Image (tube, rainbow, N blue to C red):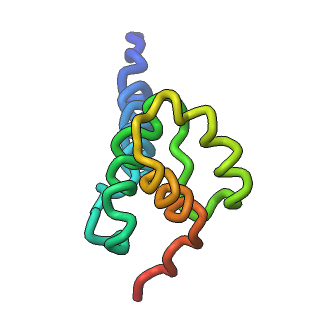
Amino acid sequence: MTRRAPIPVALVAVALAVASWACSREPPFDPQSVPPPYREVAEIHHAKCGACHKRVEPGTRTRQKLEKALVKHRSRVRMTEEQWHLLVDYLAQAPAPPGP
């Protein structure tokens, strides 16, 4: 009696892992979905934040927590004072309601 190799089980495990990864990926960032005053900082946020840690998404932190946490980032990220204020405003806003 010959024994079958466990290749089918391994293939199923890989297929499930790939499917899980594909379903959990975030949709591509669309700058047009962000209100005009925040587009520039939203693009900076999307491109840079998350390189060193999990990116904080808009509406998930209070303004007070954001201001306290972003103090340490000022020496690492070169933005104008206006950009910093816009970034805090952008991140502190409530997320947009789901579409139709």
Q: In this view, does 79 lie above or below 26?
A: above
Task: Name which quarter of the figure residue 93 lies in.
Answer: bottom right
Q: Is residue 78 left or right of residue 72?
A: left
Q: Where is residue 75 in the image (x, y as percent from the top left)?
A: 52, 29
Q: Where is residue 40 in the image (x, y as percent from the top left)?
A: 32, 57
Q: Camera-side residue: 73 or 21?
A: 73
The residue depicted at 62 percent of the width and 32 percent of the height is 72
Can you say which quadrant of the picture contains the C terminus? bottom left
Q: Can residue 16 be seen at all in this image of the molecule?
A: no
Q: Camera-side residue: 25 or 35?
A: 35
The residue depicted at 65 percent of the width and 51 percent of the height is 66
The residue depicted at 35 percent of the width and 47 percent of the height is 44
The residue depicted at 47 percent of the width and 37 percent of the height is 50
Q: Is residue 98 above or below residue 28?
A: below
Q: Camera-side residue: 9 or 2?
A: 9
Q: Is residue 98 left or right of residue 28?
A: right
Q: In this view, does 2 lie above or below 100?
A: above
Task: Name which quarter of the figure residue 99 lies in.
Answer: bottom left
